[in-house]
């Protein structure tokens, strides 16, 4: 007789190819909690003249985004609704992100709020935060 240590997660990770295929095709992959909210990936870039935020949000309509500024906080939110079409094919797995998101960023004092702009091209929401030239001037203080 061989003793095998009990592992409550044993069935979560298949150890055979057949087990992997069964898990892939038979598990429930449509998670409603994950469909309601998500957090898109954001790249933050900085140059001498501006900051840029690049949000990876493919499949959205540009009308579904909201960009607000409250005091020193930039709030970007949006929603992509899941619309299941009844056809011959049924979803086996859904990995595309649906639902709503909200991301907030503290704005540095040097951002010129009046010139903030945004564009949505090829699944990337690009928000440009220009720097105020007057506030970005560099000074050197001499020590006496």
Image (spheres, grey):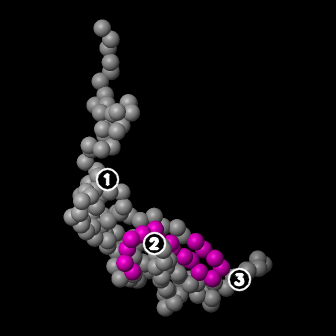
Quarter of the picture containing the C terminus is bottom right
Q: Could you tell me which secondary element the residue under label 2 belongs to?
A: loop
On the image, the x and y values in percent for residue 142 come to 76, 79
Q: Who comes first in sequence, dot 3 or dot 2?
A: 2
On the image, the x and y values in percent for residue 28 come to 25, 48
Q: Who comes first in sequence, dot 1 or dot 3?
A: 1
Eyeballing the image, is 17 above or below 88? above
Q: Who comes first in sequence, dot 1 or dot 2?
A: 1
Q: Foreground mark, 1 or 3?
A: 1
Q: Nearer the viewer, residue 107 or 92?
A: 92
- Indicate yes or no whether the magenta region holds residue 86: no
Which residue is the site of mark 2? 123
On the image, the x and y values in percent for residue 123 come to 45, 72
Q: Are marks 1 and 3 in contact (CB under 8 Å)?
A: no
Marks 1/2: CA–CA distance: 21 Å
Quarter of the picture containing the N terminus is top left
Eyeballing the image, is 9 above or below 125? above
Which residue is the site of mark 1? 93
- From this viewpoint, is residue 107 visible? no
Marks 3/2: CA–CA distance: 40 Å
Start and end of the magenta stretch?
A: 45-62
* Mark linked to residue 139: 3
């Amino acid at each position: 007789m061989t003793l095998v240590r009990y592992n409550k997660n044993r069935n979560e990770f298949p150890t055979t190819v057949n087990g992997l295929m069964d898990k892939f095709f038979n598990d429930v992959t449509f998670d409603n909690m994950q469909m309601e909210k998500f957090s898109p990936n954001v790249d933050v870039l900085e140059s001498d003249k501006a900051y840029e935020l690049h949000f990876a949000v493919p499949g959205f309509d540009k009308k579904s985004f909201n960009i607000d500024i409250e005091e020193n906080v930039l709030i970007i939110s949006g929603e992509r609704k899941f619309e299941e079409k009844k056809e011959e094919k049924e979803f086996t797995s859904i990995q595309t992100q649906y639902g709503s998101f909200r991301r907030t960023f503290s704005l540095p004092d040097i951002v010129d709020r009046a010139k903030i702009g945004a564009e949505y091209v090829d699944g990337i929401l690009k928000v440009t935060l220009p720097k105020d030239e007057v506030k970005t001037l560099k000074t050197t203080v001499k020590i006496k």
